Image: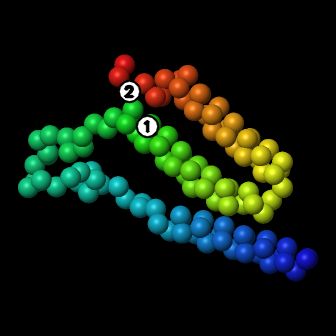
Amino acid sequence: MNLTTMMGATLIMLATVMMMMASLLSKKSITDREKNTPFECGFDPFYVARIPFSLKFFLIAVIFLIFDVEIAIILPAMMVMNTSSPTEWMITFTMFILVLLVGLYYEWYQGALEWSN
């Protein structure tokens, strides 16, 4: 037990040191205006290359991903129902669904689900 704790602490410290070294060594020390601008035959670009992004669309996509992952959690829960205690399963599943519904209500209350405003 003690050996496992020491090895875990050593690995965490080693990983932290390696990430700090990589972060320090990868920084660019010289920033040049010419290197940071897009190249278009030596001229400044005539138009903005980036199209404005709809924040509403992004919010709806994130909400969809959250509920998609939750479906991936719910499906295996149905298989576990046969091997676990019915009351424990029901309490756990009810709490899970309750958290989902509270989150959905909060998004609805904040207006994140209103597409046209």
Up the image or down, 10 lies above or below 96; here it is below
Amino acid identity at mark 2: Trp
Q: Could you say whether the residue bearing mark 1 is in a helix, strand or loop?
A: helix
Q: Are marks 1 and 2 in contact (CB under 8 Å)?
A: yes
Q: Nearer the viewer, residue 77 or 60?
A: 77
Q: Nearer the viewer, residue 81 or 103?
A: 81
| Image quadrant in which you'd find residue 85 | bottom right
Residue beneath the point at 58% across and 49% down = 70
Residue most extreme to the top: 117
Q: Is residue 81 left or right of residue 29?
A: right
Residue beneath the point at 35% across and 22% down = 116
Point out which mark residue 60 bears: 1
Q: Which residue is mark 2?
A: 115
Residue beneath the point at 72% across and 75% down = 11
Separation of residues labelled 1 and 2 (CA atoms) = 9 Å
Q: Nearer the viewer, residue 25 or 98?
A: 98
What colour scheme was applied to this rendering of the protein? rainbow
